Image (cartoon, rainbow, N blue to C red):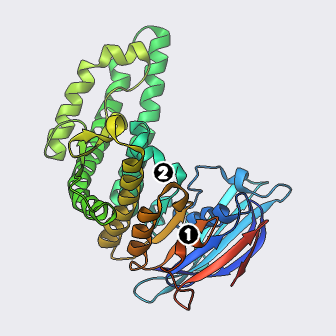
Amino acid sequence: MNLKRIQIRNFRNHNQTNLTFAVGINALLGNNSEGKTSILEAISYLGLTKSFFGASDVTVLQIGKEFFEIEGTILADGGVENTVQVTYEKSSGEKIVSVNQTRSDKLTSFIGKFPVVILSPESNGITSGPPAERRKFMDLILSQVSTAYFVDLQEYRGVLRQRNKILLDARSLGRLEPKVIEPWDISLARYGSRITHRRRLFAMEFQAFMRNSYRELVPSSEEPQIEYNGIPGSSIDEIAASMTSEICKHRSEEVRRGMTLVGPHRDELQMSISGMSVQKYASQGQHKSLLVALKIAEFFYVKEHKNEIPMFLLDDVFSELDELRSQHVLDLIGSIGQTIITTTGESVFHDTVSWNGQNRKFYVEKGTCSAR
């Protein structure tokens, strides 16, 4: 899949930006706060309908403007060209997503259609942050490769919100009516067991992708490993039974705390290198290398499961890598297809990238962009 063109209007500091991308490496060059990352953020709307920063639509809207519009032309690997448009209007608060002028009213019918992989400083939490960051990492990958997973995740989040409200009310009242909570217990176990089962399969499948990527970046005997830690069970039914049992065990504690204490929203994806916990013992260099390896592994995992090359966005990656690791990254991404990279200087590309028809560089300054 290739992003051929993008048009950005009233987005961050971009009044009107039109770019035509090459099929290989596309470098967005410029100083900080000039609008490089905003271009990647706009591209993320074409695949995810939202900012990869987690910023709200009204936040990315240019100050003083009433709407923003992002339009991209995406060529699928099968040769089909699609026009994706995302428009947000401040007055109504409405965001409209359309493909080939046909509106997509449901996220479940859009997410995964144009997969995107993003590596940015915001990704650091995957290896060094709390468990929620690693759950988010899994959920984004699985939601893009499996509509069924995304549907289950949306349903689970709805059940969780309602169940937490009931528990919070029960804490205030000092009692809980079983007939009120039991239907939500059933739904929590139903959707939660599916999510846990799919995440556990993902961790086992993803292992090989991660190890291959890490080996390319760090030619050493270090061996990275991931393991999903959640409700036990080898099948969905076994996990649902275990989850139901755990819910009963934690009933009084849940009422006391006013929140759901059992389910995949509390699970962990444990990461280690050569048997040592990444969160506890990894060096700064190991964190950086593992993070890049995880994202490159994500790229190949999504590519294999979607039979489509995802858009690969790299934001300010080289500032956090030494020269050797930077060269390893460039060697890897130079052969995988289209990538769009932001960086403050082009010296990292010297002797590695030829600026020809396959690769292109752009200079970004104060929300304007020029190709050279």
* Position of residue 163 in the picture relative to residue 220 (left or right): right
- Report the residue that reaches farthest toward the bottom: 357
Percent of width and height locating residue 51: 59, 56
Q: Do the residues labelled 1 and 2 touch (CB within 8 Å)?
A: no
Residue drawn 33% across the image and 69% down it = 300
* Position of residue 42 in the picture relative to residue 325 (left or right): right
- Report the residue that reaches farthest toward the right: 64
- Mark 2 or mark 1, which is nearer the start of the sequence? 2
* Position of residue 9 in the picture relative to residue 136 (left or right): right
In this view, 125 is above or below 40:
above
* Position of residue 142 in the picture relative to residue 4 (left or right): left
In this view, 356 is above or below 74:
below
Residue annotated with mark 2: 123
Mark 1 residue element: strand
Percent of width and height locating residue 274: 21, 46
Percent of width and height locating residue 200: 23, 48
Mark 1 burial class by Cα count in 10 Å: few <14, some 14-19, many 20+: many
Residue 6, can we see it?
A: no
Q: Nearer the viewer, residue 284 or 85?
A: 284
Residue drawn 23% across the image and 32% down it = 243
Residue annotated with mark 1: 341
